[in-house]
Amino acid sequence: MEDTVKKLINSATNAGFRKLLVESGIWKDIYCNIAAKISIVVTIIVSVLIMLVFFNGTMFDLLSSLLPTLIGGMIGLMAFSLSAVAIVTSTISNRFLITLLERNKGKSDAMLKTIRKLIFTFYFSGSLDLLATFILILDLILLYIFISTTVTFIITAIMTLITTYIVSFSLIYSLELIGLCIKLRFLIVDENN
């Protein structure tokens, strides 16, 4: 049991964001999971609609009211992700972790990695929400800078693609966290047996 506790302490002390990002491989989700595929479709549709609005001449009115609302929504989503991390980590007791690792002696490293990945997914989601918020703020600033029509069109096209992808991916990825909570819950139920 003492070995298990040492393993848990060592795991917790080596848990920086970049290290967990590389170790878990979660960064690959940005381009190769189901949320990424759905986000690509949403990005194409929304980008085409925004370009139609651009040529219609009502883009400024639309985006000047839409962007602040999206910024507020992304901040709320980030708060949701961070509170989910707090709730999930508080439900995982020391006894649960020790029992899980003791029962799976041969696979304890793999089990510990899985638990870390589950928890890190919430952290990663919050980071994506923060990135989306910063991109939306940049979009809002760029909206009020006067540039020639050709440059405005190019900047609008590029920023629309980036913004729509990151925002839609963040929303869908946050929704996927529900499935992770369910997986984690079933692991925790096993603690009492």
Image (spheres, helix red, strand yellow):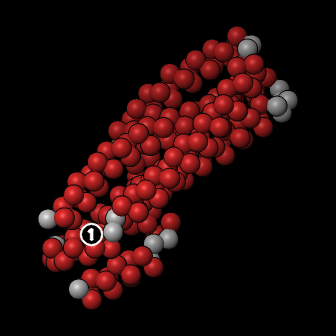
Residue drawn 42% across the image and 76% down it: 12
Q: Position of residue 79 (x, y in %)?
A: 56, 48
- How packed mark 1 is, by other alpha carbons closer than 10 Å (few <14, some 14-19, many 20 or more), is some
Location of residue 131 in the rendering, given as x and y in whole percent from the top left corner: 60, 48
Residue where numbered disc 1 is placed: 96
* Residue occupying the point 60% across, 36% down: 73
Which residue lies at the image location 29% right of the left edge and 55% below the top edge?
A: 184
The quadrant holding residue 190 is: bottom left
For the residue marked with disc 1, what is the amino acid?
A: Phe
Question: Percent position (x, y) of residue 176?
Answer: 37, 42
Quadrant occupied by the N terminus: bottom left
Q: Which residue is at the far front?
A: 192
Frontmost residue, 104 versus 53: 104
User: Which residue occupies 49% across, 49% down?
Assistant: 81
Q: Nearer the viewer, residue 87 or 42?
A: 87
The number of numbered badges drawn on the structure is 1
Residue at the outermost right position: 146
- Asked if residue 108 shows in the view, the reply is no
Is residue 126 shown left or right of residue 100? right
Above or below, comparing residue 72 to residue 24 in the picture: above
Check disc 1 and report its element: helix, strand or loop: helix
Quarter of the figure with the C terminus: bottom left
